[in-house]
Image (cartoon, helix red, strand yellow):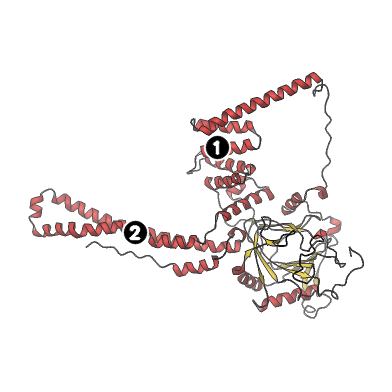
Amino acid sequence: MLWIRMELPCWCLLLLSCLQSLSAHNDFFTSIGQMTDLLYTEKDLVTSLKDYIKAEESKLEQVKRWADKLDSLTATATQDPEGFLGHPVNAFKLMKRLNTEWGNLESLVLSDTTDGFISNLTIQRQHFPTDEDQTGAAKALLRLQDTYRLDANTISTGNLPGVKHKSHMTVEDCYELGKIAYSEVDYYHTELWMAQALKQLDDGEESTLDKVTVLDYLSYAIYQQGEIERALEYTKRLLELDPEHQRAKGNLKYFEFQLEKQKKAADAETEKQKEQGTTNTTEKKKVKKRSPKTFSLIPERKKYEMLCRGEGIRMTPRRQSRLFCRYYDNNRNPKYVLGPVKQQDEWDRPYIVRYLDIISDAEMERIKQLAKPRLRRATISNPVTGVLETASYRISKSAWLTGYDDPMIDTINQRIEDLTGLEMDTAEELQIANYGVGGQYEPHFDFGRKDEPDAFKELGTGNRIATWLFYMSNVSAGGATVFPDVGAAVWPQKGTAVFWYNLFASGEGDYSTRHAACPVLVGNKWVSNKWIHERGQEWRRPCGLSEAE
């Protein structure tokens, strides 16, 4: 009798462990730490897919053996049908095959081996990244491209600084990135990535996409940027490949009409200038030379991007010579008299210091372990409404930890108090942040300005007097903390912390502390910070007599 036994391994327990950490979370692209769970989910899916393939192969192998056996049997039987059936056993077996075994074969062929795989895939798809995640990750790539001035080919070939796992982008990947830019009406990046897709197709890369589709997007993106002549060239190339392409045929006529119109307008203007005697041949226009912009006059966005690339840092040798490193015990604090910590000056105005080897590997791993299941999309306080909301300029996830979560958090808070001399009872909880794809936090102040009188009213602890920032991972490329107004850049270094005052001793805000977290180009950035408030510092940091003191 023909039979089959289909067995698929049980992946449910393994999958549930991954799904528990994925459930109730979205915005995967905003946290590399949480995205790692997706890799294990995908690995489980591949395992279940392979088991499904094995089950299908087993079924086909049985059908093949049955077909081969019957092929040989019927070939012999049909040579002498009466003689063959004259044997009673052969007659019996023919009845049995047609009545029973062909029915079993039908059941085998109709049996569905996809149930196990499809059911698991369906369960997991509920926790897959969404269109928003894919768009967010694509925008992050475009942001990295702009901030670090990377050409499309560099990104596509994976030649990024500090990469351990080089990854190549396919034609489809480049095309998808261009399409997302197109949907955002970003024709500049649409052109860059459609041109890269076309280049890879021209270089002979195999793809399900054809050049016609890519050229269609490319020519339109170029036209939208006002370069009609180049758009016309790509349209002609498209029509060479597909002479019946209706949209391209229409565009060809339109582009040629527009170019002719521009030519006539230019000729008319030249003729008019000749009549008025104001052509360049009779009077040369004086071109005023522009002096190079000083750093202070460069727009903040440009300064921010320059500093992220390591450019425009405004530390002169004279000022550099006044920065020192030292063993620090905070005025002979009993805990650090025999074992002072290593402290080094990072910047002079505002005064920023870094503490080295200030948090252990075990502490950092424990903090990450506690924070990971609590991570949620980081928010900002709306300056108008005061409502917490997500923002495109802050790409990370954060969590808050207290001593109730683990006594180690109290130990870390006490360490910050001992080294800064500031009261921690009125400080905010320890915030842990993990940055996502191209994770960043654009220029902002930590303290509340005068036009935000209710910024921290609910806390009742006054303004944020100081910031303490732990770096809990090294970052292969990017991820610096920069201060655009003063041209300062502080680079992540695992196990260290930086500290600065947001307010002068007078209580006035120090606007030079406006800072930003640069996009992470390569790597996984973990930080934790402590925002320290005014209340409780009256005797620890007495008020100054002038605003800038």
Q: How many marks?
A: 2
Mark 1, Cα crowd under 10 Å, few <14 / some 14-19 / many 20+, is many
Q: Is residue 69 above or below residue 334?
A: above
Residue at image coords 85%, 67%: 507
309 or 188, nearer to the observer: 188
Mark 2, Cα crowd under 10 Å, few <14 / some 14-19 / many 20+, is few
Name the N-terminal-most of marks 2 and 1.
2
Q: Residue furthest top?
A: 275
* Residue 433 position within the rendered picture, expressed as x and y whole percent measured from the top left: 66, 65
Q: Residue furthest right?
A: 545
- Element on which disc 1 rests: helix
Rendered-image quadrant of the C terminus:
bottom right
Residue, disc 2: 112
* Residue 520 position within the rendered picture, expressed as x and y whole percent measured from the top left: 66, 57
Rendered-image quadrant of the N terminus:
bottom left
Tell me: 458 left or right of 104.
right
Q: CA distance from mark 2 to mark 1?
A: 42 Å
Residue, disc 1: 216
